């Protein structure tokens, strides 16, 4: 997977400054996942957000344009090969129909928005092995009849 | 998508009895998502769990075997066409790399298990439109070195 | 493409009664496209709507359940082979990026909903050859930041 | 998605001059969607149109050739990953058969042309959330018998 | 490849009566290729045409409906495996770009219609080996600007 | 689609000299389609043919080798996205089985060669809209029994 | 892989009579590979050949039609999973370009016909392990220029 | 298809020296197909073989390493588009099952090795058109039971 | 995934008799993995082995033929969706190149046979969680030069 | 397959120093397969491990960052074409279901981890031909119920 040049620049600067996305969350007042999505050009920042990101990383303002543009989104490969990312594909394969039924039982015919949507990641400490907690929250969109 | 015969039987009986998966959660003491996964033959029940499901739905014990068998799992179509299920595919496409980075920043090189894993669905009431909340919790598995 | 049994029944009854979808639009007070989507099990009717459809077609009430269920949606084949349907695929291939740019210029980063969405089809008479007019209207959904 | 060099040049010049496609529509007397299609090398301009575009953007006439050439068209990836563009794919997946039936009921066996075709995008203001309106108009082409 | 039931009936009846498509061409006053397309449910007949076909083959009028319906078209498999059909795929692969250039040089930016289209097949006798002659004639459709 | 360097050179020189493939047909005594196939490296020229092409375009003899080499043939993408080229794919999808039946009825079990093959393109003027005429002629090859 | 009914009948009858394809070769005077191709509906027999096959297997003459019809050919799955058949796919993957170069060096630009083609299989006894010998012979077809 | 740099160097040097693979066969004492496989980096040479190849082509010994390395093998595209190479894919599609049956009838359950394997290409002169003869010889490998 | 009828019969009989594959290993003197491969029609039994399997499961001798036939092998779906089976696909994706290098460093250019091959599965008890041990042993096959 | 630059550097340095992965195993105290996985950027080293690798290969410490980063994993092509790697794909195709059944019979419903996982490769000398022995050991992960 070849990353866009701007993504490589941002990741390298972040690494050099020894900042984690969690650090950036505190500085920028935005969730770390959303910030990472801006880095990977899957989300667009406002001009102020772009400035703040670039200043934090000591990168020049010439990149503002790159961060505020509305990106063409998506990883690309139809079935992801990276094991971490694949597990989310597997969850959709295995639990897709159960999720569909439960959501529709609670809300009616419609979907969970992936646009009016947030995603948080937390670390749950556990003596039997720490756990990754993912919390997704998406607006329910009922199918319109016309 | 053609469902297994047992799935069709279970769904029909559940419909006829007017039970939701949330109702079954109360009766069975298991999460509604997991119960739906058993219905869709993506998870296997213990013998007691199978009995309880069948009794609740007034289906004969001959189906115990169907519910306790270890299923071949997965929806099938590589890219799902159903809009509700597709959104989870899209989330993986758009937020896959950000999720990977955040998890690995918090935990190191490894993955979130999709096996030692739970998934809950809640309804968040919201005046601007109710929201679907999905909470995933999977054990972090660090890559073993050898 | 094999159609669901209920779809075949509905189409056959409609044919026998000599009704067009435009006729059904007048009787049911719903747009013909939406009604056709119910026939093809891509949309779900309310119980009254289902009753009305079945009465109009003189089909028994036992099918109410089929029409009110929330269907697993989507045609299936990745690239459609039917020339009429393919043209919509081609429009997305050829005009996808221009549409993306224009929508985002007018609205910001986000998408047109395909759920809070209507689609109408009109016949434009034209001496040089009649034209098909398709009007889509979907709510704009801005990407949420968090 | 890597854009052709000429597309990148045109988009950069347009950005620098602070012009929207709607502005270009007024200057050029052509619809903004069609102009964007020329930018993305999905449509070919006449020599005068090319000149006017280049003068407006203060780009040299050496690019006339690029804009008047007849392009090899199409986005490429079979299933688009960008959420905005994917929704059009989804519309074809979900409403493809209903659209086919309605068009053929109104016109007979044939298709809507994607060549003798126009596409307009309008913003519908709506207190519940603005809406994207897409109007497609394509000549109906009946299947020839011979 | 599983053929529709009506196709099998028509082919069987034609075989039993010892008729070739060329014979049917004489009887029906339509080209043999178009008639074969009706047999394979890739084209739709008028009611008179359907009657004439069925009478010629001594099949009952109950099949009129099958022959006049507007079919969902297309073979299905993305790359055909049958060698005779594959050669047309190969011609498109090898001569696609040259054909595109020549047509556009003669006509401008546009396409050859596959709808307002006829296709004839002739046998050219040749001492070095008979030749198959395919003559396609499709209306040129110029890209509309708007 | 990225063209080979030699193709780009040939097309640029041809454009600069204002020559059409039809002009080259007159100069070279070979059909324009075949010449275009040489340009796109889908056919190989003899040394004299290569010389004549290069002299006509005032390109140096160093390219002889490029034009006389036996190319690896084929466009590449499984389903073409360019609308003009796609129509030939569609013709094979829709009329593939009818063509197969007619050819085999006239010739027996075998195929039309795509190697011992010619393809001509003519413009048919027509008041209702000019037509593209494609004439293919391929040697019939009967299946050998052994 | 589901075999056509006639193939299953032929294979079952052959098994019951204890005949190998090599035995059939002697009886029918045709190569065993070709006979197997008829069994699998990849080749068409003449009426006498069909009769002789059916008589040998003591199957009724009603199947003559099945064996003389011109089949739609090809296995289907794009990459074969059966290890024996896959090896031929692998040979094409690994030795495809070398074979292309050698054939073209010996014959010029063209192909080996897969239609005017025979294939024989012999057993080579070898103390280090018997060997499978495959001999293919296909007419060379030079690309026609026009 | 982009060839490795070393392949391009070898092919260019061979061309310049006017050598065919058949000439190299005589010089190197290895079959021309195997030598071509080394050129295309599908087979690995010993150090002496590499030296001899490079000396013959007057290329420096720095390339020894390239020729003795164990290559990652395979052409790449799932279905080859080059007509000459495709025919081998077609042979596998059409004659795959017959070949499987004949080999297994002669040898039992197992495969023909594509590793302990040789492939020769001969020109058969024939007044009706020369023929390409391909002789494959692969060790039979019976399935091991354990 | 639909299993062959014989597989279903064998699995049902085995279940009813309460036998594990490990039990069958003791009775039949063959490894449990190989026996399971026979059940799933991926391996062929000798006549005695087939008899013994059928007697053990109290199934009639009419199935001998099914178990001794040489099956068409392979699961089918290109990327497996079942999580257990997918992990083997993932291992090949992640460790494929390292495995290739290590094997070739130890053995030279060649492959590990998947035919002259055995596979054993053991349970390693471990206080931190039991482990699955898979031992594969395949004959090394060096590439033949010729 | 294009390798990352760091992989090429590591492999070249290792070759020049005449070291095998087995040598590196002795020096680094890590298994050769895991070390090769670090080389191919499929596993991440600790800082000390990275230093030791780079010192052994006499490469500068600037590459530490490359070796300690958490890579995006996976080979890429869905079905591998290299014969050695393909055999592992084939094993999963042929023995996937038997392996699934045996593991689940021994452990219950769950999977073998590919993360808490080791893989060793040994050479088994054998007069009939040396054998490749692969030993995989993965923690069993039972499906969690919730």
Image (cartoon, coloured by chain):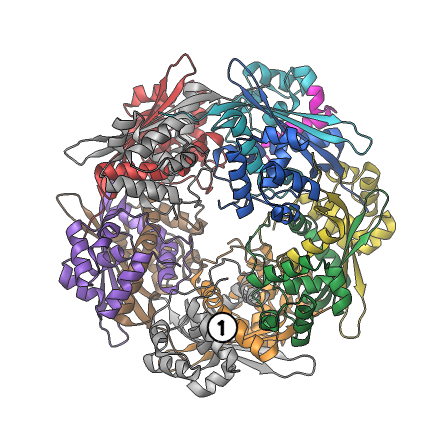
Chain colours: A orange, C green, D yellow, E blue, F cyan, H red, I purple, J brown
Q: Residues within 10 Å of mark 1 (few under 14, many from 20)?
A: many
Q: Nearer the viewer, residue H5 or H86?
A: H86
Q: Quadrant of the C terminus of chain F?
A: top left
Position of residue C70 measured from the top left corner of the image (x, y, whole percent): 59, 70
Q: Is residue H2 visible?
A: yes
**In the rendered image, the vertical position of residue D138 relative to residue J140, given as above or below:** above
Q: Which residue does the numbered mark 1 point to in the structure image?
A: A98
**In the rendered image, the vertical position of residue H96 relative to residue A38, given as above or below:** above
Q: Is residue F19 left or right of residue E64?
A: right
Position of residue H57 measured from the top left corner of the image (x, y, whole percent): 38, 23
Q: Nearer the viewer, residue E27 or A86?
A: E27
Position of residue A82 measured from the top left corner of the image (x, y, whole percent): 45, 60
As helix, strand or loop, the secondary structure at mark 1 comes to helix
Q: Is residue D17 left or right of residue A126?
A: right
Q: Is residue F4 magenta?
A: yes
SS majority, magenta = helix
Q: Residue at x 74, y 31 (%)?
A: F131
Total numbered badges shown on the rendered structure: 1
Q: Is residue A104 left or right of residue D20?
A: left
Label 1: chain letter: A
Q: Residue at x 29, y 53 (%)?
A: I41
Q: Is residue A41 visible?
A: no
Position of residue D34 measured from the top left corner of the image (x, y, whole percent): 77, 48
Image quadrant of residue E24? top right
Q: Is residue F130 left or right of residue A33?
A: right
Q: Quadrant of the N terminus of chain F?
A: top right
Magenta region? F1-24
Q: Is residue A59 magenta?
A: no
């Amino acid at each position: 997977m070849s990353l866009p040049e701007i993504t490589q620049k941002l990741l390298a600067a972040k690494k050099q400054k020894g900042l984690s996305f969690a650090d950036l969350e505190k500085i920028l007042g935005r969730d770390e996942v959303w910030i990472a999505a801006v880095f990977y050009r899957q989300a667009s920042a406002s001009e102020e957000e772009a400035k703040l990101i670039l200043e934090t990383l000591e990168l020049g303002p010439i990149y503002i344009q790159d961060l505020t543009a509305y990106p063409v989104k998506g990883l690309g490969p139809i079935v992801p090969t990276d094991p971490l990312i694949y597990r989310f594909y597997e969850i959709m394969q295995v639990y897709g129909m159960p999720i569909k039924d439960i959501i529709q039982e609670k809300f009616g015919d419609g979907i969970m928005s992936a646009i009016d949507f947030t995603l948080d990641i937390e670390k749950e400490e556990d003596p039997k092995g720490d756990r990754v907690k993912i919390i997704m929250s998406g607006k329910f969109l009922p199918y319109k009849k016309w």
